[in-house]
């Protein structure tokens, strides 16, 4: 005689918990539910990662569009140094010498540099943001 065992596929959330019988429907049963008897909405990590990425990209895109509209609106009603500002600084060259020291000289051909920047979070209309340009304008140019 041959006995064949069948495999049953148990899916999470499909089990029914039999915690006990009630006598006439009045008594409460005390105990804990088995793990498979309760449905839990667990979001897989890949789906959660995709949703988080889409939310972050969407927030960044909305912030960029808002920043661009702010610059365009301020261009309609310009004030001095808003939305664009011109920064002027001496053009300093950092010249590497043979002994490893660096000599700093002001450029004889072009002693001043003027950089135009935009007051915004992101670069717009071909100009870098002023928060990025201001700390870097006085850095020497390596030769």
Image (cartoon, helix red, strand yellow):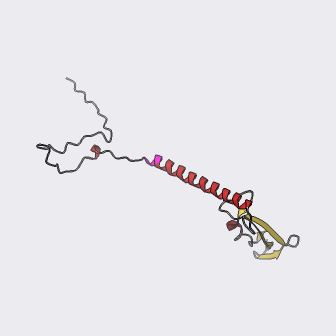
Is 67 in the magenta?
no
Residue 142, percent from left and from top? 77, 69
Res 123 visible:
no
Considering every residue shown, the one lying at the far top of the view is 1
| 142 lies left or right of 30 | right
Direction from residue 43 to residue 59 in the image, left or right: right
Residues drawn in magenta = 41-47
Residue 72's spot in the image, x, y percent? 71, 57
Say which quarter of the image contains residue 82.
Answer: bottom right
* Position of the C terminus by quadrant: bottom right
Where residue 136 appears, as percent x and y from the top left, is 71, 69
Observer-nearest residue: 138 or 7?
A: 138
Q: Is residue 32 left or right of residue 142?
A: left
The outermost residue toward the front is 77
Does 45 appear in magenta? yes
Q: Residue at x 17, y 51 (%)?
A: 30
Q: Quadrant of the N terminus?
A: top left
Q: Is residue 2 above or below residue 69?
A: above
Q: Quadrant of residue 126 in the image?
A: bottom right
Q: Is residue 71 left or right of residue 108?
A: left
Tell me which residue sits at (27%, 43%) in the image.
37
Residue 38, can we see it?
Answer: yes
- Who's the residue at 25% across and 46% down the image? 34
Q: Which residue is nearer to you in this view: 66 or 30? A: 66
Q: Nearer the viewer, residue 12 or 56?
A: 56
Q: Identify the residue at horizontal 67%, vertical 56% (top origin).
A: 69
Total labels drawn: 0
* Residue 113 image offset from top left, x and y in percent: 81, 69
Furthest-left residue in this view: 23
């Amino acid at each position: 005689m041959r006995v064949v065992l069948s495999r049953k596929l148990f899916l999470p959330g499909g089990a029914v918990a039999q915690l006990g019988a009630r006598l006439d429907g009045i008594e409460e049963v005390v105990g804990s539910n088995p793990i498979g008897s309760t449905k839990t909405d667990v979001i897989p990590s890949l789906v959660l990662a995709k949703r988080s990425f889409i939310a972050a990209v969407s927030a960044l895109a909305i912030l960029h569009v808002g920043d661009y509209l702010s610059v365009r609106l301020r261009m309609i009603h310009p004030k001095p140094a808003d939305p664009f500002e011109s920064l002027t600084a001496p053009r300093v060259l950092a010249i590497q010498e043979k002994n490893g020291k660096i000599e700093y000289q002001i450029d004889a051909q072009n002693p001043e540099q003027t950089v135009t920047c935009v007051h915004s979070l992101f670069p717009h209309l071909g100009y870098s943001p002023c928060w990025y340009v201001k700390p870097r304008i006085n850095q020497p140019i390596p030769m």
